[in-house]
Image (spheres, helix red, strand yellow):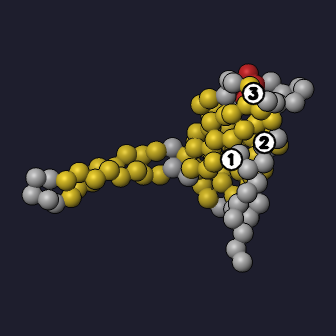
Amino acid sequence: MSQLNGRVIMTVANQRIATKEGSAKINIGGVEREATVADDGSVYSTEKGIPGQLDVDILVPTGVRVADIQALKNTTIVAEADNGNTYVYRQAFCGKASEISEGKCSATFYGKCEEQ
């Protein structure tokens, strides 16, 4: 039976970041297409590029500074899933990480994603 990913180990610039189990949402990015229907019923599409995106809850124990997470830019993020899949976000940056609740901070990162 094939295993689905549940846990993701996150590494930023070769440093392990503790995340809440099961919280990672991985979007590999690429191209998004939208359909447009002409008056004669024929269908056309437009494309737009979308970045790779990683949404994750980062644990915030003593010593972890959310401001340091916010400041991340032009870095490499590796997300290793427990099913063996690995996602590498290059030229990555933090888009959002500011609210701390119940010992964790929800963060969003963007970058060019490669599946390995």
Q: Quadrant of residue 6?
A: bottom right
Q: Is residue 49 above or below residue 73?
A: below
Whole-angstrom CA distance, mark 2 to mark 3, is 14 Å
Residue at image point 78% right, 48% down: 21
Kindly check if marks 1 and 2 are in contact, taking CB atoms under 8 A apart as contact: yes
N-terminal of the pair, mark 1 or mark 2, is 2
Instruction: Tell me, yes or no, if residue 92 can be seen here.
Output: no
Q: Position of residue 5 (x, y in %)?
A: 70, 60
Kindly identify the amino acid type of the residue bearing the numbered disc 2.
Thr
Quarter of the image with the N terminus is: bottom right
> For mark 2, what is the residue?
19
Kindly identify the amino acid type of the residue bearing the numbered disc 3.
Ser
Q: Position of residue 63 (x, y in %)?
A: 89, 26
Q: Secondary structure at mark 3?
A: strand
Residue at image point 56% right, 52% down: 28
Instruction: Tell me, yes or no, if residue 47 can be seen here.
Output: yes
Q: Position of residue 48 (x, y in %)?
A: 37, 46
> For mark 1, what is the residue?
24
> For mark 3, what is the residue?
101
